[in-house]
């Protein structure tokens, strides 16, 4: 049996039939994702099973004026990355892939912070997804003009969060080729 692999989206990865249950998230991957990655607006990481995409996340640089938990006295322009999209094919939901992709985004943020400032992992969530992000230790910060909720995960907390918190069966499924090492 072939193991799923985490890697950056490539032109020959099959997007046919990808359906996470959210048409906007599906459309981003199938229509805009490759072009936006080529233009360096985002980096798309996919979990592939035999070149078929079964989950993905899109990461980009981001900043927001906000108070940091360790300095509530003044608002700062806080640098980070944004988890712009997160989707898991319906057939694979509930197996820890979303958690795994969030954990991967945290690792990317920590890697970036070794060379440039990166303190927060941001996510913009619809109301019905806020609980999911809250369960992953994200906190509500503000609302966008379009009504999305901006959630943040302080990368300072990432020392407490570890990939081996995933159930062993899900971690056994994945091999990682993220090009960061």
Image (cartoon, helix red, strand yellow):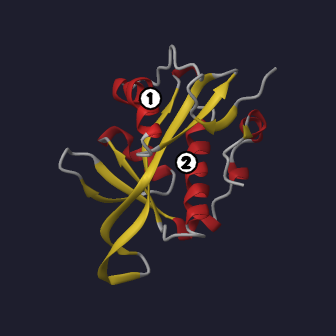
Q: Which numbered tag is attached to residue 102?
A: 2
The answer to whether residue 92 shows anywhere in this view is no
| Image quadrant in which you'd find residue 166 | top right
Q: Which numbered tag is attached to residue 82?
A: none
Q: Is residue 101 above or below residue 65?
A: above
The answer to whether residue 145 shows anywhere in this view is yes
Q: Check disc 2 and report its element: helix, strand or loop.
A: helix
Instruction: Work out whether mark 2 precedes mark 1 in sequence or the reverse, and give the earlier one.
Output: 1
Query: What residue is shown with label 1?
Result: 29
Q: Residue furthest left?
A: 145
> Picture coordinates of residue 29 (x, y %)?
44, 29
Quadrant for the C terminus, please: bottom right
> Picture coordinates of residue 172 (x, y %)?
78, 37
Q: Is residue 132 above or below residue 151?
A: above
Q: Residues within 10 Å of mark 2 (few under 14, many from 20)?
A: many
Q: Is residue 94 above or below residue 147?
A: above
The number of discs equals: 2
Residue at 34 percent across and 28 percent down: it is 24
The foreground one among 10 and 160 is 10
């Amino acid at each position: 049996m072939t193991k799923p692999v985490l890697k950056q989206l490539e032109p020959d990865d099959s997007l046919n039939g990808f359906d996470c249950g959210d048409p906007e998230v599906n459309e981003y991957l199938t229509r805009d994702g490759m072009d936006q990655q080529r233009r360096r607006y985002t980096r798309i990481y996919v979990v592939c099973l035999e070149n078929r995409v079964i989950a993905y996340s899109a990461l980009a640089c981001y900043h927001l004026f906000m108070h940091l938990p360790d300095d509530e006295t003044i608002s700062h322009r806080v640098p980070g990355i944004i988890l712009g999209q997160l989707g898991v094919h319906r057939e694979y939901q509930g197996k820890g892939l979303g958690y795994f992709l969030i954990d991967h985004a945290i690792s990317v943020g920590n890697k970036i912070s070794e060379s440039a400032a990166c303190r927060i992992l941001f996510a913009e969530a619809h109301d019905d997804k806020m609980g999911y992000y809250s369960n992953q230790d994200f906190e509500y910060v503000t609302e966008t003009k379009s009504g999305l909720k901006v959630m943040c995960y302080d990368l300072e907390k990432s020392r407490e969060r570890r990939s081996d918190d995933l159930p062993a069966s899900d971690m056994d499924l994945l091999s990682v080729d993220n090009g960061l090492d």
